[in-house]
Amino acid sequence: MDFINDFFDQLSSLLWGPFTLIFIIGVGIYFTVATGFFQIFHFKDILKNTIGSLTSSKNDGGKGISPFQAVSTALAGSLGTGNIIGVATAIAAGGPGAVFWMWVSAFFGMMTKYSEIVLCIKYRKSDENGFYGGPMYTMEQGLGWKPMGKLFAAVCIFASFGMGSTVQTNATAVALERGFGFPQLVTSIVITVVCAVVIIGGIKRLSAVASKIVPFMSILYVLVSVFVLVKNCFVIPEAFRLIVESAFNLRATVSGGAGYAIMVAMRYGVARGVFANEAGMGTSPIAHAASNATSPVKQGQWGVFEVFFNTIVMCTMTALVIIVTGAFESFSDGGEMTMRAFSSQIGSGANFVIALCTALFGFTTIMSWSYYGEQAIKYMFGKKIILPYQIIYIISICFGGVCAMDLVWKLSDISNIMMVFPNLVSLVLLSPQVIRMTKEYKSEMRRKKSE
């Protein structure tokens, strides 16, 4: 078992090497420049067309789910243990500097996810149940590369059992055991039953549940984090300074030389950033493709907001709480580090709040990834295989709460990057379409303002 763990650890390190980091950030830089820094100069419009549109009763299409339900489902899949435990794990492995590289990957990742969604809306399909799509359809119809679409779908199915179900169930079960004393087996069974009811109900039931839970759990976690940060507001500037210094090894935080230290921080920052916001993985666009939105560019703007809220807001809050409380200097376990950071400021009640947030984050991620896996297996084998997949997925949920997770985390990192490569290649090759649609949108906005 040690040999297997070591093998996959080395494979993960190899796949998440310098070339991968450059590739991921490079694609984001390319789309950022090619669209004229869309996420900066049109941020006001992005907010207006996303959260600013929630008070509007206008429906963009006749079927499918609403744009907000789509982004809630996508956020449910990306707002998970990566925002709580994953951030702490990155800091434990790469130092506070990992947070800086998480920001970098998120800033450029906004345009990567925007581009993914734009293309998935363009190439999606529809049936009697509504719209559906994903990178596999983009690869097949946009590039004529059905084998690559099959490869992406196969890896997505595999990842759904790791990153989607077992990892999330395990993190949830451990958190509830620490916070409330619930046995992990009992938690696993309860989560399995509840998720089964939602999963069997399909995307409309899933999106309806997500659109109610996601805002609640996000607000709860933000309020608790803000409380801790306000108590330590005078330390926050020092925390930011430490993050930047550590990112460039301006102080000797990691042994082995400056170059090695920077690479370690970059690796864990980018890897955990992708794990948290899924920019470049191609999974979130599967949820967005189910939206009834008629404008690919407007739905793509929800992707920009999604990455911004997920990483720049949620992950940064977790990181700052860990750093300002000094928990990163005393603990190496991600879950323990986060729990101690909050409990040192709030008291024993923090265990309950963080356990609840972790449980909600994990629960919604499990639901969303079931849909990603369903669409992937539907693409490969047709609708008749969806029910058997759902049954196996539900069983894996229960299994995840009671098994060791070291190997599963490594396999999740590997499956993540195996989705990133074909997805980013297709994005680059189809980039002229994204750039053209973005320019057309800008021209239309200028015309409306001039009228």
Image (spheres, helix red, strand yellow):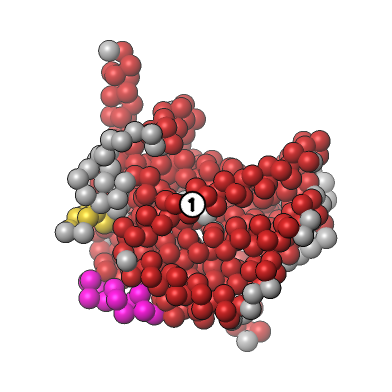
Indicate the quadrant containing the N terminus: top left, top right, bottom left or bottom right: bottom right
Q: On screen, 211 above or below 256? A: above
Task: Give the prevailing secondary structure in the magenta stretch.
Answer: helix
Which residue occupies 73% across, 48% down?
321
Between residue 351 and residue 277, name the one nearer to us: 351
Quick one: 243 or 357, which is closer to the camera? 357
SS at circle 1: helix
Q: Is residue 331 left or right of residue 182?
A: right
**Residue 393 placement: quadrant:** bottom left
Residue 225 position (above or below residue 341):
above
**Extreme-left residue of the structure:** 128
The reply to whether residue 339 is visible in this rendering is: yes
Residue marked by disc 1: 214
Q: Give the camera-side residue of 33 and 81.
A: 81
Residue toward you, 387 or 385 = 387
Horizontal and vertical percent position of residue 45: 41, 28
Stretch in magenta: 381-392
Mark 1: few, some, or many residues within 10 Å (few <14, many ≥20)? many
Q: Can residue 92 be seen in this view?
A: no
